[in-house]
Image (cartoon, grey):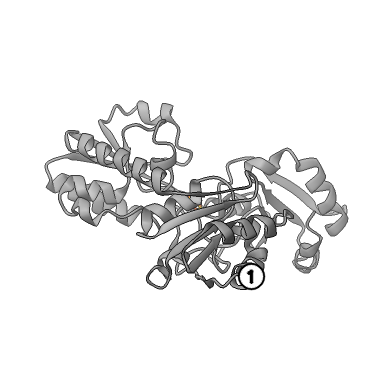
């Protein structure tokens, strides 16, 4: 499952390894531990961390240090290139699904000439192949590079689409290779160019225009509702890659200047029940930037920090930006 990482893991000569798995991989714990045993041998203690692992933003290196681990293995996400409290090996998973057919379909259906190519970790190894396919049909292709926390060429995250914005002025449109609307939705909200999705699972090419319009309408309505609110809770995450306490302080100050009450609340795992207990009128989420957007039906009274700036009068709607790190 992860043979290519075995040398890197062995070299660490660890005695106690903390293992962090995202939700989709937790059910494979027995197989993963069994493979790890064959790499490190029986004398090494393997401890699985059962809490969330939403991304490299949610690294549990402090917990790993507390339980005396001398190595952490984080499965499923690429590194943010940060200094961890415990040496960490990131085991990325790459899709074996061939993206060739869906990219060929995209080449036929997209009329624009210069395409900015984007994807996620799972397909990042095939992005050069996608470029070649498109170029063979006469398209000009640019692969952007993140200016923030994404590691691979063309890679975007829900909180970092700088691989797209960095090349926006040079392309006619974006083509995102992957499934779902989570990542391309962020690119569409954060740029002016049309975003197409080449979805290898659904075997379809779709654009994000309708979704973008809908999202912006929802955001506008939430900002207007928040303007009428009096008491705000500002969520700060203690997760290493989501902690924006200085930004939260700034938002609290802006809201207070605008005549609102604002309270900073530190929450690790955000749930509706936890927030409801505070009885605040509205929440500003400075943790994972996607919570306010993607869980908007769950957290009806939640806005992003940049939306709070509009509420406080320090930013105008015409300068709307999608929350990002
Ligand atoms: S979108 Fe949220 S969960 Fe994903 S990497 Fe960014 S902060 Fe983490």
| Image-based side of 234 in relation to 239, left or right | left
Observer-nearest of 41 and 202:
202
Is residue 19 depicted above or below 279 in this figure?
Answer: below
* Residue annotated with mark 1: 128
Disc 1, ligand 1: is the CB inside 8 Å?
no
In the rendered image, residue 20, in percent from the top left (x then y), is placed at: 66, 49
State the count of labels: 1
The crowding category of the residue bearing disc 1, from other C-alpha atoms within 10 Å (few below 14, some 14 to 19, many at least 20), is some
Residue at left offset 50%, top offset 56%: 157
Where is residue 254 drawn, in percent x and y?
18, 50
State the image quarter where residue 40 is shown: bottom right
Q: Residue at x 32, y 44 (%)?
A: 216
- Horizontal side of residue 77 vs 322, given as left or right: right
Residue 297, quarter of the rendered image: top left
Which SS class for mark 1? helix
Front residue of 51 and 79? 79
Q: Position of residue 107 (x, y in %)?
A: 58, 62
Instruction: For residue 150, say whether it is visible.
Output: yes
Residue displayed at 49% across by 67% down? 115
Quarter in which the C terminus is drawn: bottom left
Instruction: Work out whether residue 243 can be spotted.
Output: no
Please give the name of the residue rendered at 63% of the width and 65% of the height, measured from the top-left corner: 130
Q: Where does the image place residue 300, in percent across and percent down from the top left?
A: 34, 31
Asked if residue 134 lies left or right of residue 280, the reply is right
């Amino acid at each position: 499952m992860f043979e290519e990482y075995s040398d890197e893991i062995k070299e660490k000569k660890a005695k106690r390894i903390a293992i962090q798995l995202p939700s989709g991989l937790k059910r494979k714990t027995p197989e993963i531990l069994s493979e790890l045993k064959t790499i490190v041998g029986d004398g090494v203690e393997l401890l699985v961390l059962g809490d969330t692992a939403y991304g490299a933003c949610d690294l549990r290196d402090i917990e790993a240090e507390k339980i005396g681990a001398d190595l952490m293995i984080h499965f499923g996400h690429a590194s943010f290139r940060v200094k961890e409290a415990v040496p960490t090996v990131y085991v990325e998973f790459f899709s074996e699904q061939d993206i060739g057919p869906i990219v060929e379909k995209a080449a036929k259906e997209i009329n624009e000439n210069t395409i900015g190519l984007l994807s996620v970790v799972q397909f990042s190894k095939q992005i050069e192949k996608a470029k070649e396919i498109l170029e063979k049909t006469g398209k000009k292709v640019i692969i952007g590079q993140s200016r923030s926390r994404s590691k691979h060429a063309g890679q975007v995250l829900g909180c970092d689409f700088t691989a797209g914005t960095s090349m926006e002025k040079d392309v006619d449109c974006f083509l995102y290779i992957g499934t779902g609307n989570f990542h391309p939705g962020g690119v569409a909200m954060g740029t002016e160019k049309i975003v197409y999705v080449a979805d290898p699972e659904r075997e379809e090419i779709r654009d994000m225009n309708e979704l973008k319009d809908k999202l912006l309408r929802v955001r506008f309505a939430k900002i207007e509702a928040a303007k009428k609110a009096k008491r705000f809770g500002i969520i700060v995450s203690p997760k290493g890659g989501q902690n924006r306490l200085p930004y939260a302080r700034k938002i609290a100050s802006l809201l207070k200047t605008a005549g609102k009450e604002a309270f900073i609340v530190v929450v690790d795992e955000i749930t509706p029940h936890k927030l409801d207990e505070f009885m605040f009128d509205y929440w500003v989420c400075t943790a994972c930037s996607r919570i306010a957007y993607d869980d908007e039906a769950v957290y009806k009274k939640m806005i992003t920090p940049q939306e709070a700036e509009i509420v406080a009068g320090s930013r105008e709607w015409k300068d709307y930006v999608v929350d990002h790190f």
